Amino acid sequence: MKKIRKAVFPVAGLGTRFLPATKAIPKEMLTVVDRPVIQYVVDEAREAGIEHFIFVTGRNKAVIEDHFDIQFELYDTLEQRGRTEVLERLQQLQPLPGQTSFTRQQVPLGLGHAVWCARELVGDEPFALLLPDMIMQSRKGCLASMVELYEKTGSNIVAVQECDPAETHKYGIVGRGETAHTGFQITEMVEKPEPGTAPSNLYINGRYILQPQIFDILAGQTQGAGGEIQLTDAMLRLARDQSFYGYRYEGHTYDCGSPEGFVEANVAFALWRKDLNATISASIRSLLDEIKPA
C-alpha cells in the first residue's frame, strides 16, 4: 500500500461571492483571525503527514505562491528587531524547499478538471484532495483521521458530516453501508438530490483520498452539470471497480466560500484561542445588545 504523500489544493476559483474584496486578493488569502484561509488547510494536510503540496491555480493567484515562499527582507527585519517569536512562527509554517508545486487551470471547467490538471505532479500514487474553501476546527484534523482509515482499508476515502435532512438538496450526499474500522462503506453518491430522495443526510465536506485511476476517468469525461467536469461523476465511475469508504467527521466545518461562513469562521477561531476568547466573547455580547438589523 502506497503512503499518502501528496495533497492537491484547487485554488483557481474567482471568488465572485466576495467581490469587491477578491478583485485584487484571492479568496484563499482572505484572513481568518490572523492567517489566510489557505494556511489552515495546508496546516491540516501537514498534520496528516503530507509531504508535497500541489496547488492548482489560475490568473491573479501568484500571491498564494509568494505566501508559501521565503521572504528574506521580512525575516531579516524581524531578526534585527529581535522579534524571534514571530520569526519562529513564520518559519514553522514554511514548507521545506521542493515541497510545493503550482500548476495552472487555464479554463474554468470545474473541480473535476482542476483535479485532472494536477495529474503530472501527482503521478501514479494515491493522493489527498482538500477544498480550500472548507476549513475544519477540531482537536485532531479531519485528514489525519482519514489517512488512518486509508491505512486500514487501502481504499478511496470521502469525509462526510451530518446536515439538516431538509437541506440535502444543497450538497453531495452519500449512502451509508456497513461499518468498517472507523468509517463505513459508501453505497452511493448523489449530487444535490431532489428533496425527499436523498439516501441519507451525510454530505461530502470537501476532503478526499483518491486513487490515481481517477485521472484516467477525468481525462475522458464529458462536461456535466453547469457545463463543468464534475468530480462526483468521476468518483461514481471509479466506484464501479474500487471501494469507497466514508469517514464521519465530528468537528466543525466552515464554508469560507460564502460571506456568512467566512464571518462564522472568524468568530469561531477567535473564540478557540485562549488569548482572544474573553475579549471576543465580551464584544459579541455587547454587539448583540447594541446592534439591531436595519
Image (cartoon, rainbow, N blue to C red):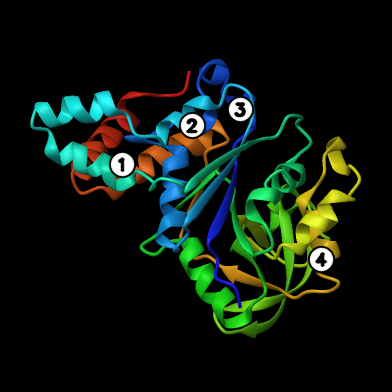
60 left or right, relative to 108: left
Q: Is residue 195 visible?
A: no
Q: Position of residue 52 (x, y in %)?
A: 50, 53
> Disc 2 residue type?
Ile
Give the Cα distance between marks 2 and 3. 14 Å
In which quarter of the view is residue 288 placed?
Answer: top left
Q: Nearer the viewer, residue 225 or 5?
A: 5
Q: Is residue 123 visible?
A: yes
Give the Cα distance between marks 1 and 2. 23 Å
Number of the label disc, if any, that sits on residue 238: 4
Q: Earlier in the sequence, mark 3 or mark 4?
A: 3
Q: Position of residue 144 (x, y in %)?
A: 46, 66
User: Residue at image x 31%, y 41%?
Assistant: 270
Which marked residue is nearer to the observer: mark 3 or mark 4?
4
Instruction: Determine whether the residue tagged by mark 1 lies in a helix, strand or loop.
Output: helix
Residue 154's place in the image compared with 222, above or below, is below
Q: Earlier in the sequence, mark 4 or mark 1?
A: 4
Number of the label disc, if any, that sits on residue 15: 3
Give the Cα distance between marks 3 and 4. 30 Å
* Residue identified by numbered label 2: 64
